[in-house]
Image (cartoon, rainbow, N blue to C red):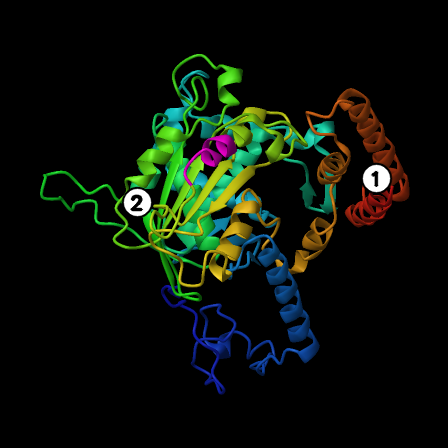
Amino acid sequence: MSSGPRSGKRRKPSKIGRNDPCFCGSGLKYKKCCLLKGINLPKALEIPQEVIDKERGAARRREEYLQSKGIYISLPNTIHFKGKTMLAVGNKVMVDDNPHATFHQLLFRNLQQSLGEQWWNEQNDKTDTEKHYIKICFENLKGSDTRTDLDVAQIDENTRSMLTTGDTQSLLSLAFDVWLLAQKGYLRDDWLNRLRDRNQYQGVRYEIGVASMFVRMGCELEFYDNDRIEEDGNPPKRAEFIAVHTETGNRVAVEAKSRHVHGVIHTPGTPNYRDALKGDITELYKKALKKVTDGLPLVIFVDVNSPTEAMQAAQDTKWYQDVRRSFDSRPTPTEENPDKYAALFVTNFSPHYQGNGISAGGQYLFMGSLHSENSFTDGHYGGFMKKLIRSVSNYGYTPPSMDNDKLGVYEQASGLNKASFERKIRELTMPTSDDPEFDRRKMESDNLVEMLIWDTTQKSGGGWDNKVAADNYIQFEWLFKQA
C-alpha cells in the first residue's frame, strides 16, 4: 500500500537550533516556542517489551480466529486519531468524524462513498417501489438498535452488538465484500456500475461475493480481456475471473451464476413461494459448463436464491434435495469421460427473504469431482479446497472489529449468542421431515430449546453470556448423545 504524500511536519532531529522550526509542530521557531517554555527536545520513545508482546499477542489471537472463519489474509486495523476514526481502503484512507466509529459503520460509509453521491441523491428522490434494494436496506437500519427482538447488548461505553435482520445481513455482507476487494485492489468499475443498476444488481452481487471468498482464502484475481474477439466475431465465453493461489500453486477459472426468482430482488413478476423453494439450476449449470477455461480447473458457483427457515438444515430443504436428485441421476464421471468442472458449489445466500426479520443464515452444497478434465495441483481435496470450503461455509461472517483494543468482541463471539445456541440445539434435537413421530418429537425439541435458553439465561445472571451458552451446549450435546 502506498504511504501517500509526506506530512508537512518535520521529522524530529537529534539536535535543534534556536532558529529551526519547533519540534512540536506549531510552525514557530524553537526560540519563540518550546525554548521559552523550558521544554527540551524529547528523547526517542522506548516502548516497553510487555506492551509490544501484548499487541502481538492480540493480533495473533485475532488472526487465528479469523482463519477459523475462512479469512486467511491480513487486514488493516482501524485507527483512532485526534477525534477521528480511519480505515485503509486500498491506497487511500477513509476518515470518519466519529471518534468511536465501529468497523461495521466504516464499512457502510465506504459502501456509500463507493456508490457515489449522485446515485444516493437519485435514490432519495425515488418512491418506495422504485428504490434500489441497497437503499431500502440502509433505511431499515434506522432504529434497529432499539428493537427488543434483536438481543441488543452493550459491549462498551460506545459500542453495542445485536442480531442481524435479513436486510442488515445483506447490506453488511455486501459492504464487507466491497471493502475487501477495494482493499486488495480488485474492485472493478464495471461491478460498481452494475451494482447501481436495479436490473443487474443480483447477478453482479453474487459475482462480487464469490470473488470475495477467493480473496479471503488468499488468492490473487486475474480478469479476462473483455475486448478480445474470436474468429466468429463474438467475444469468447470465458469465466468471471481466474483465481491464483500461490501457496498451493493453483490457478482456477471461476464462474458464478445466480438464479432469478419472479418478484424477488427487482426481478419482474409475482412471487411464488412454492417455485422459489425449488432447486432448479439446470440451465445455469449448463451455461457455466460452456465457459472456455484454457486448460484451467473450472470452479462453478450457482446460487439457488431460495427462501430459508430459521434452524432448517440444508439437507432438509427442497432446493438441496432437488439438486442432489438431479446430479445423482447423471452418469458417474470416469477418467475416459471426466467432468468439465473440478468443483461445484450450489449456495443459498438469500437473507433478503427475511427482510426485517432475523437472518436465517446461508447454506451450501459442495460437489467435488474425482475425475475432472483439469484437476487441482494438490488434489481434489488438498489445501486449496479445504481453505475454499471454509471460506464458503463462513460466508456472511464479517469481523466485529478491527481494533486490537477490542479483542474482547472476538472472545465474546467465540462462544454462542442466543440465535446460534438455539440453532445448534434445534439441529441436534429436531427430527427429520420423514420421521413417523415428527409432531411429537418436534414438540419435545421446542420444549428443550425453551428450557435450555431459560437455564442459560439464569446461569448468565439474567442476561446472556456467550461463553456460558457454549459450555451449556457442550454439556447438553454430550448428555443427548448418551441417551
Relative to 147, say whether 240 is above or below.
below
Residue 279 percent coordinates (x, y): 48, 27
376 in magenta: no
Q: Quadrant of the C terminus?
A: top right
The part of the image, by quadrant, that contains residue 436 is: top right
Mark in front: 1 vs 2: 2
Query: What residue do we see at 58% from left, 58% from top?
Result: 67
Relative to 89, say whether 128 is above or below.
above
Magenta stretch, main secondary structure, is helix
Examine the rendering and report whether any part of residue 355 can be seen.
no
Q: Which residues are magenta?
A: 323-331
Residue extending furthest bottom?
15
Residue 365 percent coordinates (x, y): 52, 40
Q: Tag 1: residue type?
A: Gly
Examine the rendering and report whether any part of residue 154 can be seen.
yes
Residue 90 percent coordinates (x, y): 40, 56
Residue 245 percent coordinates (x, y): 41, 61
Q: Tag 2: residue type?
A: Ala
Q: Earlier in the sequence, mark 1 or mark 2?
A: 2
Q: Which residue, given by chain and number where applicable, does mark 1 sit on?
A: 463
Dot 2: what SS?
loop
Q: Residues within 10 Å of mark 1 (few under 14, many from 20)?
A: few
Question: Along the line of sight, which residue is nearer the eye, 116 or 342?
Answer: 342
Q: CA distance from mark 1 to mark 2?
A: 50 Å
Q: Which residue, given by chain and number where applicable, does mark 2 sit on?
A: 239
